[in-house]
Image (cartoon, helix red, strand yellow):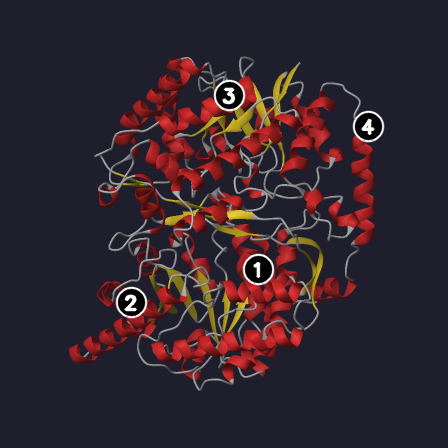
Amino acid sequence: MSIQTATLGYPRIGKNREVKKALEAFWSEKLDAESLWETLRQVEETNWQTQREAGIDRIGIGDATLYDSVLDWSIYLGLIPERFRHLSGLEQYFAMARGKEGIPALEMTKWFDTNYHYLVPEISAQLQPTDFNPVLATVKRAQQILGKRATPIILGPMTLLRLSRLDMPISEIIRPLCDRYVNLLQALKPLDIEEVQIHEPALVLGDTAKFKDDYESTYASLVQVGIPLDLVTYFDDLGESYPWVIQLPVASISLDFTRGRNLEQLKRHGFPSDKRLGVGIVDGRNIWQIRPDRLLPILDDIKPITSNLSIQPSASLQFVPYDATRETKLPEPLRNVLSFAEQKLQEVVILAQTLQGEDRRSQLQDIATGQTAFEQFSPPNTQVQQQLQSLNVDAFERSLPYAQRQPLQLQLPPFPTTTIGSFPQTSQVRKLRRQWKRGEITLADYKKAIDAEIAQCIRYQEEAGLDVLVHGEFERTDMVEFFGQQLQGFAFTQHGWVQSYGSRYVRPPIIYGDVVRQAPMTVREFKVAQSLTEKPIKGMLTGPVTMINWSYPRTDISRQEQAFQIALALRQEVADLEAAGATIIQIDEPALREGLPLKSERWQDYLSWAVDAFRLSAGIAKPQTQIHTHMCYSEFGDIIQHIQRLDADVLSIENSRSNNETLFEITNAGYAHQVGNGIYDIHSPVIPTTEHLLEQLRTGVANLPVEQIWVNPDCGLKTRHWDEVIPALKNMVEAAKMLREEIYASGK
C-alpha cells in the first residue's frame, strides 16, 4: 500500500494578522509596495516550513494572496476587464478589488457555501496577455525550502469559468482559456515539478453533467504537457458525475469525505487502479478534533478499493485559524478538543501512520480521553431542551399577515433612507475596547465613551437627513461575535482569525454547548440612541442562520437544533426591544444563501429549517413592529420563494456591484414586500456621486412600485472612514429627495 500525506492550501493571513496590517498600512501610504510583498512572502514561507516540519509529503503552494486568489488568477491569465486596462501593477490590482474613482470594482460574492468572498472574474473575447512570472517565482522559492514536496495549486479552468461573468457560452471560451493553462504547465515543466494540484470544486455542483464534454476535452489537452495532475474537489460529493470524473486522464483525484456521499460513490463505482485517491478526511472547515472511532472505519472501507492513497484535509485550511494551543484563555476541556491548522496537519500524519500499521495507540487514546472530559464539561441544558420540545406552529407566525400589518407600521416618505447598521470602527473605538478589556478603564467609563460615539453618530445621520437611524454598533467587534459573547454555549478565541475577504478578518465563535440568553444584549444602547433623536432608531440583531453559518457549530447535534436554540434567545431580545420602544427591528441574515447545499436536491431541507429559525426569532413581534432583514453578496433568484416566506417587512440587498442583477432577480420573481435597494458600494473607498446613486434608484423605480422601495448602502459601514461615509450618505439622501421630486412631478 502506498500512502502519502498532502495539503490543499493553508491560512495565508499570518499568525498575527501580518498581511492585514501590511495591507492597511500600504493603503494609508505608510508602507511601500516592496515591503507589502515581503510581508506576504514571509508569511508564505513560514507556512511552508510549518507543513514541512509536520511531515507532509505534498505541500500545496501558491495560494497566498494580497487580497483574493481568484483575483490573482484573473491577473495571471489576462482576464482584465477593459475599464482597468489603462492601469498597471498594484494600482490595477486594487482597483479591481476595491474600485477607483469612476471605475467600479469587480463584483464580490461567496466562495461556494463558505463565508469567504471572492471577486467575480469578468471574461470577454478580448483577452489580455498572460503573466505567469509570479507563479513561476513562487514555485522556485518554494522548491528552495520544500524541494520535491512543493506542489503548485492552480485554480481549474472550468471552475474559473463557472464562477465568472461571461459574455459568451463556456463552450466558446474554454478552448482559448485552456491554451493558456497549457502554456502555464509548459512553463512549469522545466522546473521539475512532480505534480500540480488543479482545484475544480465546481465539479461538485449539481449541474456538472452538462459540462462533461468541456471537462473531458480540457483535461485531455492539459495532460499532454506531461506533468502529473491532481484533480482536487471539495465541499461535497461528485454525485451522478462520479463515474466519468474518475476516468478523466489525471494522475490523482482528491475527494471530500467529510461532506456529501463520496464514500457511497466509491463503494458503488470503485476507483481506477492507475490513479491515486486523495482522501479528504480531516475536516478543513471546522475546528473540532478528529474522532478516530468515526474516521478509521471509513479508511478501512477505502483500503480494499484502492491501495494508492493520500491522506489530507477535506479542503484548504484557510477556513480555520492557525494554532489551537495559543488559546490559553479557553477552558482546558474545550481547548483539548480543538483542532486548528497546525493540529490538522498532525491529524493527517497520525491517520496516515495508523493506516500504514504504525503504532499510534497512545495519541489515539489521548484524543479519546479528551473527548470524554469535554462531554462532562458541557452537558445538555434541560430548560432549552424543554423549550424546543414545546414549540408549536404559532411560535413561527406573525399575528397578522403582511398586508394587514403594513398599514399599522411607521409611515415614512417615499424612498425612506436608512443604513444597514454599523458605522466606522475608528482607531479610537478600537482603543477604547482594548482599554476596557485590559482593565485600564472601568466599565462605566467605557459605556460613557461608547455613548459619546453613539451621540456623534446620531448627529451625523440627522445632518445627512436619513429617515431611519441606527446607533452605529460601536460596542460590537463583529456582528456574530458580539451576540455570542453574551450567550451561554459560545466560546471565543484570542487568535482564531480567518479571512472573510481582503483585509477583513473575523474570529468565528465556537458553539460548544446549548445556547441560552442570560440577559438583554442590545437594549441599553438602543435606549441611549433613541433618547437622542425624535427619528426612529432600528434595533439591530444578527439572525440565527447567520450566527450558525459564521460560527464553528457543534457536530454532535443538527444545525437546525442549534439555529432554533439561537432563535429562542433572539426572540426574547425582540420582545425586550419592543418593550423599550423599538418600532423597527432588523434581524440580519446575510448568510442565509451561503448555507445553501451545493446540490439542489438538498435545498428544501435546509431552507425549511433556516427560514423557520428566522420566523421563530421574529414571530413574537407585534404587528406594529416593522421587521427588517439584510442579505448581501449572494444570488437570490432561485430561492426567492423562501425569502418571501421569511415574512420580513423590509428586505435590504446588495445591488451596487451586481449591475442590478440582485434587484432584477427579486422583482422578476414578484417579491411583494418592501426592498432596500443597496445602491452604495461600501467595500470601495470611492465616494459615489449623487448622479450615480440617482441612476441606481431610477433602475429600482423601473422595476418596483414606489411604495416598495427603501434606499440604503449595500452593507454595513464599519470598515469605511467617516470622511468617506458622511459625504456618501449625504449624496444618497439627496438622490432619494431628487427622485421624490421627479416622481411627484410626473404624477406617479
Q: Is residue 597 left or right of residue 327?
A: left
| Residue 626 higher or lower than 562, as above or below | below
Name the N-terminal-most of marks 3 and 2: 3
Q: Nearer the viewer, mark 2 or mark 4?
A: 4
Question: What residue did someone put label 4 on?
Answer: 361
Name the N-terminal-most of marks 4 and 3: 3
Kindly report the distance in space between the C-alpha atoms of the residues bearing marks 3 and 2: 57 Å
Kindly report the distance in space between the C-alpha atoms of the residues bearing marks 2 and 1: 32 Å
Question: What residue did someone put label 1 on?
Answer: 480
Check contact, mark 2 vs mark 4: CB within 8 A. no
Question: What residue did someone put label 2 on?
Answer: 704
The total of numbered circles placed on residues is 4
Q: Nearer the viewer, mark 3 or mark 1?
A: 3
Q: Residue at x 68, y 27 (%)?
A: 349
Kindly report the distance in space between the C-alpha atoms of the residues bearing marks 3 and 1: 41 Å
Task: Report helix, strand or loop for mark 3.
Answer: helix
Q: x, y (%) of residue 643? A: 45, 60
Task: Report helix, strand or loop for mark 2.
Answer: loop
Q: Is residue 467 left or right of residue 112?
A: left
Question: What residue did someone put label 3 on?
Answer: 143
Q: Residue at x 41, y 31 (%)?
A: 209
